Structure formats: structure tokens, C-alpha cells
């Protein structure tokens, strides 16, 4: 396997990790925004407790993706950051506002009105940021961002303003909301009313994924032919079957109250979806003019980067395992609200 | 204003905002770990309360710092795509390593902040120590990338084509060690002085408050150690700059005419057309001595460089002097506190010292902002010293005024809210008289 391919896989894996961890944190914000009913405040509190200890660390996957792209594929990075200037600039506003609103709400809400105000900012930025991220990834697959001799020729609006990219943005929002609600059914074990709230939310958002996925698929036929070809190609059936089994398994487990199984199935579902997109996207970083090989930086840098990532992973995964073990649901009481 | 100037201003603003939080993210973990370790030794509840309150403050500031740091990693590409195209493969390495350091920091900060009741005391303290160490590491990696922009090495450039890229050599440019050292100490010094100021403020009215006494003693202790070290590291970085970036050095010192036995000029307004400084204080021979250790050292003046390679001398010179002035003031404060310690007088007993500490609170941060202006404006017109001009690196995107204004408004809002948030954490709910020992 070429070193570019290894790094492409690292990027894909990091995106999957980001989606199932950081993505779910965004989804939590969406349910915060949509909290209603007599238990709205308790829903918000449960979400806040669940993501509190982990969201900062989960967010770093996105930074890892960015730095690996600019270290290993600097020519593509320059083009992506120019072509997707507008949505990515907006992503930055979303990231800063979400993080700030989350901590301000927690530590600096003198009264209920202030708390609600920051909740709204937190929720709105959690809803918008994944949309813009999905939009940007969709744009890279759309084939509308064109590059000639290493220079962008299609300006600042190509790709991300298309229907396919917008579909990807909506799909990302729904997917993350589904993940978050599914996780929350495990986080709220022991509180039946709250658990049932999140169960209904997980089922609703999980079911909504089907029509959205279908719409994105149909849009891909003209809007992202590389992805469409992959989804109808030789290895598509096993992948589609695996995704469908995971999706149906997740919904069935939610319906029958097997929440820990549902969580695993939901993670598998998201993993298959992103892996499928990655297979369709490969070997292009920007469809159809820039491949990973075209955009690769100096060979020595790429080799050293692979080593650095391998050593970093040895440090990272045990640390993450420790973090999640300490704060797993049921590991000795709630995180300490008053002190955290 | 041109788009280039808006791009530079947006980058400057993003950095200026982020650096405050980055610095606190390095400094605060050390403070809270010291408080917790002291508590584990003597079980004074005021120390535990202190460690917890400092941890809360750190949580707020770290979140804003992490988000504003993400902004920077995107803005490198959004604003300077051609720079990244050229340099990504050469200096991406430290950024990637920084990613892991940042992961470690975020993971163990989560454990520290939320793990008070879930971890054994020793494990909890260990998490705090990991946060403190990974904070230094992540700063060191990012500064290594900046150092490369000042002293680019680790590649060969022939006819615009880069070959022989050695990412490790690029990371270890001659500017790396002095810059990392200077910035790390700056982080401790600024945080120490800032925290000392907050608690000195309360001690003026409640001199017996155990909580604030502990806090003040820890913070001023860091200032006492860091201030003299910072002057020494400043000397190191100045000598490095004189050698590697003589134009920047000349602008810092407002030194127009090449020659030995050069005088040091403090303050004043540099006038590029007259090639002279108005109203500055001139100290004979000192600049040559500082630059090379001897009064006979020849110091290159701006006259050694074509006019279009001069940085903005007014900004660079005045920012440099501002930084040095703040550093010297903190050194004086550290000396004053040290003398009281040597004479075995309690640090919190002198109202004059407490007043001075309150006034000196922002100085470390002002020095850091000024210092980055020196580093960055002083490198202009280059984005990579001697290799690529800033105007060649900028995005072709028009209308950069829009994100500039947007970020300015957002950062302004966040700053106001942050001050209010920290006030409610430390001032209004401050452990008042009930903690009196």
C-alpha cells in the first residue's frame, strides 16, 4: 500500500472517529435546542453531563484531519481552503460559538434567562456546524470544484452550493442527532422517563435517515457521479447490506429496549456510511482533478508523518480508553456537577 | 484597506485573541496542580477549594482557547493558501505532533475537571500533571512551526522547486529553542502575575483570608522564578534575532545605520525617511554589547537592506520597547517579593506590594501581545523569511472585510462575556470571610 493511501485511510478513520464522538456531541446540542415537554430541563442537563468531560477531546479529531491534510497533501489543502472558503469560515464561527456557549452556560449563567440564551446559541451552532461540514465534504465529492495545473478555476461558490452538497449537510445533521439520541438512551439508564424521551428521539431521527439517505443517493446520480458509481458498483452490495443491517439493527434494538446493542449498531451504521463515502471518493481528494497521489507532499514528510501518527496512536487510544472508562454510564455516580 | 491588510489583520486578531487563552492553558494547570499537591500534603481545605476554583476558571478559558486555536488551524489555509501549499509539507510535522499533544491535554483535562469524585487523589493529581506537561508540549510544537517561518531550514529551493525536505530539521530551526523557551516562560510569568493580581486585590481588604493567601503565594512564587529567567531568555532570543533576522533586529532597536559601538535607543518615534529616531533615549555602546557581547560588534542597520524589505519600524520598535518595559517591571516586582521572602517577611503583609501586584496583573499579557507583534510585524514583508512574501501567500478571495468584522464582533462579545463569567467565578462567589484562618 502506498504511503498516500495509508494517510488517506488515516484521514478516513479520523473522520469516522470524529463523526461517532464529536458528531454525537453536535447531535447532543441539537437535542438541547429541540428539548421540549415537562422534562426539557432534565434532558438538557443529562446531555450536558454526558458530553461535559469528553467533548473537548472529541473535537480534536477534526483538528487532526486538518493537520494531516495540510501536512501530507498541502496542494489540495490550499485549493480546498480557497474553494470552500465561505462554508469553512462559517464553520469557525460555529465552533467558537458552540464551545463558548457551552461553558458560559455551565459556569456563567447567573439566572435562568441567561442560561436559556446560551443554550440557544449552543443548540443553534450545534445544528449549523455539522450541516456546513457535511456540505463541505459533499462539495469535494461533487466534481464541481475544478483544478487546472494546480490552480482552482471554479471560484468560491462551486460545489458547496449544489443540491448534493446541501443534501450531505442535512444528512450529517440527521445522522449526528440520531447518534446522540441513541447514546443518550444508554447515558440515562436508571431514569426511565428520560430514557424513553431519548428513545423516541432516536427512533424518530433514525427513521428520518432513510428518506434523507435516499434523497442524497438520487442527488448523487447527477450531483456526485463518483459517489453514485461507487454506490452502484461491484462492491456496493455487501456495503449496502452491512449498512442496512446496522441501521435496522439499531432501530430494532431501540424499539425493544436493547440500548447498549443499539449504540453499537448505530456506531457501525455511521462507520459503514462514512467508509462507503470514502471508497467512492478514493483515489480523489477533490473529485475529479486532484488525487491523493497528485496532492502528496514531500515523500519523506509522508513517511515520517505515518510514524508520528502510529506513535501518537499508541499514546492516544489508551488515554481515550481511560477517559471513557472513568466516565462510562454507571461508573460511580454522575459526574460531579457542582465541582466540574 | 486592501484585502491583504484585512487578511493580516484577521490573522493578527485571531492570534492576539487565542494567545491569551493558550497562555492561560499552559500556566493555570501548573497553578492548580501546585495547589492540589499542597493540599495533599497538609489537608488545608482552603487549598482544595482553591484547586477546584482554579480548575473551573481553567475549564472556561481552555474551551475558548481550544476553539480559537481551531480557528487558527483553518485560517492558515483560508487566509494563506499559497503559504500552506509551499510550507505544509515542511512544517506540517510539528502541527501533527501538536494534534496529539492537544488530544492528551483535552483528555486529561476532562478527567481532571470532572474526575474529582471518580479518581483516587493521586490519579487525579497525575491527570493534572499530564495536562500541564502536554500544554507545554503543544505550545512548543506550534512555536516550532513559527520559528521555521523566521529561520526556514530543512529543505532546498531550486528554481522555485522544493527538494530534500527534512521535516525534523525544519522543526529544529535555530530559532526554535530560543522562541520556545521565551514563550513558555512568558506563559508562566503572565499567568502568575495575572492570578497574583486577582488575589492581591482581595487580600488588600481581607489580609487573613487563607484562600487568597495560598493563591497569592503560589502565583507570586511563579513570578519570582519566571521573571529573571525571562530576561535571560529574552537576551538569548535577541542575539538569535540579530544573527538570523538582522532587519527585524534593526527595526526592533530602530537602528538605521550599520556600525560597531552602536547605541541602544529606548522609546522615541522612528522616522524612516530621516533614518533617525526622534525623542528617543540613547545609551551609547549598549546595542553592540547586547547583540554580540562586545561593544565592537558590528550591528547591521536598516540601511543594509533594500527599503522594500523593511518592516514597519514604528510598530516593531515601540512594541519591542513595550514588551521589554513590561518584563522589567515584572522583574522589579519579583525582586521586591524575593527580598521580602529572604528577610522572612510574609508576602501578603505589605499593602504596597499587593497594590503593585494588582497594577502589574496585565503586564505579562501586554508583553506577550507586544512580543508577537515584534515577531510577526518584524518579519514583514516576508511570511517565510527571505523565501516568500506575505502578499504572495494570501487567498484570492475578495471581501475579506466581512470575516474580519464578523470575527471582531464575535471576539468582542466573547471577551465581555468571559470577563463577566470569570468575575462570577472568582469575585462574587469568592470564598469570603468564612474561610478566614
Image (spheres, rainbow, N blue to C red):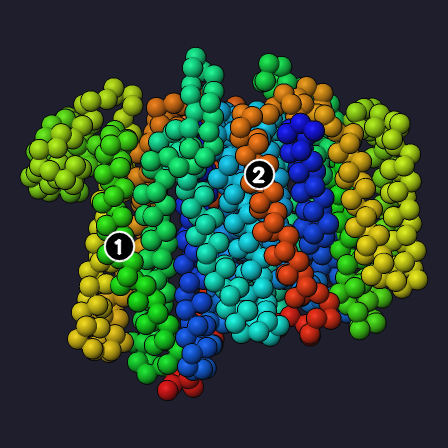
| Mark 1 lies on residue | B229
The residue lying toward the viewer, choosing from A157 and B93, is B93
| Mark 2 lies on residue | A307
Residue B106 at least partly seen:
yes
Q: Residues within 10 Å of mark 2 (few under 14, many from 20)?
A: few
Left or right of B387, for residue A12:
right
Q: Residues within 10 Å of mark 1 (few under 14, many from 20)?
A: some
Q: Relative to A117, is B339 above or below?
A: below
Percent from the top left, x then y, of residue B436?
A: 38, 85
Left or right of A158, for residue A68:
left
Locate the C terminus of chain B and report the quarter of the image it occupies. Answer: bottom left
Query: What element does badge 2 sit on?
Result: helix
* Picture residue at 37% right of the left edge, 81% below the top: B210
Query: What element does badge 1 sit on?
Result: helix
Percent from the top left, x then y, of residue B259?
A: 11, 27
Percent from the top left, x then y, of residue B27?
A: 41, 59
The chain ID associated with circle 2 is A
* Picture residue at 28% right of the left edge, 61% below the top: B225
* Picture residue at 67% right of the left edge, 27% below the top: A2
The chain ID associated with circle 1 is B
Amino acid at each position: 500500500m502506498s504511503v498516500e493511501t495509508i494517510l488517506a485511510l488515516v484521514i478516513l478513520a479520523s473522520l469516522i472517529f470524529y463523526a461517532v464522538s464529536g458528531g454525537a456531541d453536535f447531535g447532543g446540542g441539537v437535542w438541547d435546542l429541540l428539548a421540549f415537554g415537562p422534562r426539557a430541563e432534565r434532558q438538557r442537563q443529562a446531555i450536558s453531563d454526558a458530553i461535559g468531560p469528553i467533548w473537548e477531546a472529541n473535537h480534536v479529531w477534526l483538528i487532526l484531519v486538518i493537520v494531516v491534510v495540510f501536512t501530507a497533501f498541502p496542494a489540495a489543502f490550499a485549493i480546498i481552503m480557497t474553494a470552500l472558503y465561505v462554508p469553512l469560515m462559517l464553520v469557525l464561527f460555529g465552533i467558537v460559538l458552540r464551545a463558548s456557549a457551552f461553558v458560559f452556560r455551565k459556569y456563567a449563567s447567573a439566572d435562568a434567562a441567561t442560561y436559556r440564551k446560551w443554550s440557544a446559541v449552543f443548540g443553534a451552532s450545534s445544528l449549523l456546524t455539522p450541516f456546513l461540514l457535511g456540505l463541505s465534504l459533499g462539495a469535494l465529492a461533487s466534481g464541481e470544484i475544478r483544478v487546472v495545473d494546480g490552480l482552482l478555476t471554479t471560484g468560491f461558490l462551486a460545489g458547496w452550493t449544489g443540491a448534493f452538497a446541501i443534501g450531505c449537510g442535512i444528512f450529517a445533521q440527521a445522522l449526528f442527532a440520531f447518534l446522540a439520541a441513541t447514546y443518550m438512551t444508554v447515558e440515562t439508564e436508571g431514569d426511565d422517563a428520560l430514557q424513553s424521551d431519548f428513545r423516541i428521539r432516536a427512533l424518530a431521527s433514525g427513521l428520518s435517515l432513510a428518506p434523507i439517505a435516499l434523497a442524497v443517493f438520487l442527488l448523487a446520480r447527477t450531483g456526485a457521479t463518483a459517489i453514485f458509481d461507487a454506490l452502484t458498483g461491484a462492491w456496493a452490495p455487501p456495503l449496502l447490506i452491512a449498512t442496512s443491517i446496522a441501521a435496522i439493527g439499531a432501530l430494532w434494538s431501540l424499539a425493544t429496549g436493547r440500548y447498549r446493542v443499539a449504540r453499537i449498531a448505530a456506531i457501525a451504521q455511521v462507520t459503514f456510511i462514512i467508509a462507503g463515502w470514502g471508497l467512492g471518493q478514493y483515489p480523489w481528494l477533490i473529485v475529479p482533478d486532484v488525487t491523493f497521489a497528485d496532492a502528496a507532499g514531500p515523500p519523506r514528510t509522508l513517511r515520517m508523518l505515518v510514524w508520528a501518527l502510529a506513535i501518537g496512536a499508541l499514546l492516544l487510544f489508551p488515554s481515550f480508553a481511560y477517559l471513557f472508562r472513568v466516565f462510562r454510564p454507571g461508573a460511580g455516580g454522575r459526574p460531579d456537577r457542582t465541582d466540574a | 484597506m486592501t484585502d491583504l491588510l484585512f487578511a493580516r489583520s484577521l490573522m493578527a486578531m485571531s492570534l492576539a485573541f487565542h494567545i491569551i487563552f493558550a497562555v492561560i492553558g499552559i500556566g493555570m494547570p501548573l497553578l492548580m496542580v501546585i495547589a492540589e499537591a499542597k493540599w495533599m500534603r497538609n489537608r488545608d481545605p482552603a487549598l482544595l477549594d482553591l484547586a477546584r476554583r482554579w480548575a473551573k476558571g481553567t475549564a472556561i478559558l481552555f474551551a475558548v482557547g481550544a476553539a480559537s486555536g481551531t480557528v487558527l488551524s483553518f485560517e492558515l489555509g483560508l487566509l494563506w493558501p499559497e503559504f500552506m501549499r509551499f510550507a505544509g509539507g515542511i512544517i506540517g510535522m510539528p502541527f501533527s505532533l501538536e494534534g496529539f499533544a492537544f488530544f492528551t491535554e483535552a483528555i486529561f483535562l476532562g478527567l481532571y475537571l470532572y474526575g474529582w469524585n471518580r479518581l483516587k487523589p493521586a490519579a487525579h493529581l497525575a491527570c493534572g500533571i499530564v495536562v500541564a506537561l502536554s500544554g507545554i508540549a503543544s505550545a512548543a510544537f506550534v512555536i516550532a512551526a513559527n520559528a521555521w517561518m523566521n529561520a526556514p531550514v530543512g529543505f532546498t529551493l531550486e528554481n522555485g522547486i522544493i527538494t530534500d525536505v527534512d521535516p525534523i530539521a525544519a522543526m529544529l530551526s535555530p530559532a526554535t529553542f530560543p522562541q520556545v523557551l521565551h514563550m513558555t516562560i512568558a506563559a508562566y510569568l503572565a499567568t502568575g502575575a495575572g492570578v497574583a493580581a486577582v488575589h492581591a486585590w482581595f487580600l488588600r481588604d481581607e489580609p487573613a483570608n487563607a484562600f487568597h493567601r495560598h493563591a497569592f503565594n503560589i502565583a507570586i512564587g511563579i513570578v519570582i522564578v519566571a521573571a529573571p529567567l525571562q530576561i535571560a531568555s529574552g537576551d538569548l532570543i535577541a542575539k538569535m534575532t540579530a544573527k538570523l533576522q538582522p532587519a527585524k533586529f534593526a527595526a526592533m532597536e530602530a537602528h538605521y545605520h550599520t556600525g560597531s559601538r552602536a547605541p541602544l535607543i529606548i522609546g522615541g518615534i522612528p522616522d524612516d525617511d530621516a533614518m533617525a529616531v526622534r525623542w528617543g533615549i540613547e545609551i551609547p555602546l549598549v546595542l553592540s554589547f547586547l547583540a554580540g557581547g562586545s561593544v565592537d560588534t558590528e550591528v547591521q542597520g536598516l540601511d543594509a537592506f533594500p527599503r522594500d524589505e523593511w518592516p514597519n519600524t514604528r510598530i516593531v520598535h515601540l512594541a519591542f520597547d513595550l514588551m521589554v518595559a513590561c518584563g522589567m517591571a515584572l522583574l522589579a516586582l519579583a525582586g521586591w517579593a524575593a527580598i521580602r521572602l529572604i528577610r522572612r517577611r510574609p508576602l501578603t503583609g505589605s499593602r504596597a506590594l499587593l497594590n503593585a501586584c494588582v497594577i502589574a496583573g496585565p503586564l505579562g499579557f501586554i508583553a506577550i501581545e507586544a512580543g508577537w507583534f515584534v515577531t510577526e510585524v518584524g518579519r514583514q514583508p516576508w511570511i517565510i523569511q527571505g523565501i516568500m512574501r506575505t502578499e504572495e501567500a494570501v487567498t484570492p478571495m475578495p471581501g475579506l472585510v466581512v470575516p474580519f468584522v464578523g470575527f471582531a464582533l464575535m471576539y468582542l462579545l466573547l471577551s465581555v462575556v468571559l470577563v463577566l463569567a470569570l468575575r462570577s467565578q472568582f469575585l462574587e462567589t469568592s470564598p469570603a470571610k468564612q474561610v478566614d484562618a
